[in-house]
Image: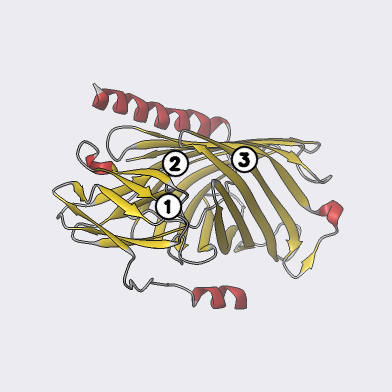
Amino acid sequence: MMNKMLKVLLRSLVLWAVVILPVWANPADYVYTPTVEYGERELDVKYGAASDVAGNSNAASVGLGYGATENWFTELYLKRENNAGQKVNLFEWENKFQLTETGKYWADLGFVSELEAPLGGNAPWELRVGPLVQKALGKFQLNGNLLFARAFGRADENGVPYTTNLGYQWQVKYRWQRKLEFGMQGMGELGTWDNWAKQAAQNHRMGPAIFGKWPLVSGHAIKYNAAWLIGMTPVAPAHTFRTQLEYEF
Amino acid sequence: MKTILFLSLLFPLCAIAGDADYKIVIREHHFYPSELTVIAGKKMTLLIENQDATPEEFDSDALNREQRIRGHGNITLYLEPLAPGHYAFAGELHEATAQGVIVAK
């Protein structure tokens, strides 16, 4: 009975991703955490939609991840992004490294690298890397990440040279119950890493978020998180809804 | 680029397992001891040794820890000071038998 339910759930998850992918596209950014679970296997689906004066954009992705060692988690994604009518399909390879034992030092440290490649079209490749920091304070979990991103490959059609840009993520989560935790998260892009844009040209957004994990049969679980981010600067989307669903098996 | 190179030097960082304050053994999908008494209010290390050939997943919402242990492997948990009370944990891969509790006094 439980196996049958699991199969139905898994088929629904994949079907949801397959339906979403052709209609929308673009995986919504999510806040990385520095912990790796060795042996974890997961099917990951993300969706995000944003609205601003330039138009609507959305993204979806489906990925398969694996905790290869106690310190290294690797994941492959197929993504589709739709930015105000401009659509692009992408392949992404994400690697996350846990650099310190959880709780051993004042904060937990990790590192993420993300390589994105276009599947056809004129979009450039993109590499994104950065440190991940996590701190537990009682029932609160705090996260802060810096991300350096750079496009490369096919030249920009306007002739603008690619630069290394700096972004950030932060999150505050209260671990109320495993099935339902809540908090706040924020993300932003500051511009070139060594020459930030003026504040009005920076992209900052933040808002409430929920999280949770629903255990299934032994070793299997559904994890989710979702957030509603509000634009805090003129160039940021007024509203962004992002969600992530993971099936661990 | 310099930042990336510097950060890459930090990988891999392996924790050197020194003497842990407490130890729990997994054997035949049971925890020994299944009830561990610890000193409340003191930071501590807990060594979990898996004597079974198959992996186990130490899972505790109360301790905010979820970590897989290889067959014939071990992990060390670094725990913040615990307030007096009971902190349940389980082996997620063998929940029927792998159950335990840490009692902080």
Marked residue chain, label 1 = A
Q: Position of residue A69 (x, y in %)?
A: 33, 61
For label 1, the crowd category at 10 Å Cα-Cα, with few meaning under 14, some 14 to 19 and many 20 or more, is many
Q: Confirm or deny contact between disc 3 and disc 1 (CB under 8 A).
A: no
Instruction: Kindly identify the amino acid type of the residue bearing the numbered disc 1.
Output: Glu
The residue positioned 79% from the left and 54% from the top of the image is: A202
Name the residue beneath numbered marker 3: A183
User: On the image, which quarter does residue A2 sit in?
Assistant: top left
Task: Identify the mark nearer the N-term, 3 or 1.
Answer: 1
Q: What element carries label 3?
A: strand
Q: Is residue A247 above or below residue A161?
A: above
The residue positioned 49% from the left and 52% from the top of the image is: A92
Q: Where is residue B90 in the image (x, y as percent from the top left)?
A: 29, 43
Name the residue beneath numbered marker 1: A75
Q: Is mark 1 on a helix, strand or loop?
A: strand
Using the numbered discs, state the Cα–Cα distance from disc 1 to disc 2 in whole angstroms.
9 Å
The residue positioned 47% from the left and 49% from the top of the image is: B83
The residue positioned 46% from the left and 47% from the top of the image is: A77
Marked residue chain, label 2 = A
Q: Position of residue A178 (x, y in %)?
A: 46, 37
* Residue sitting at the far top: A1
Instruction: Kindly identify the amino acid type of the residue bearing the numbered disc 3.
Output: Gly
Marked residue chain, label 3 = A
As drawn, the label of residue A44 is 2
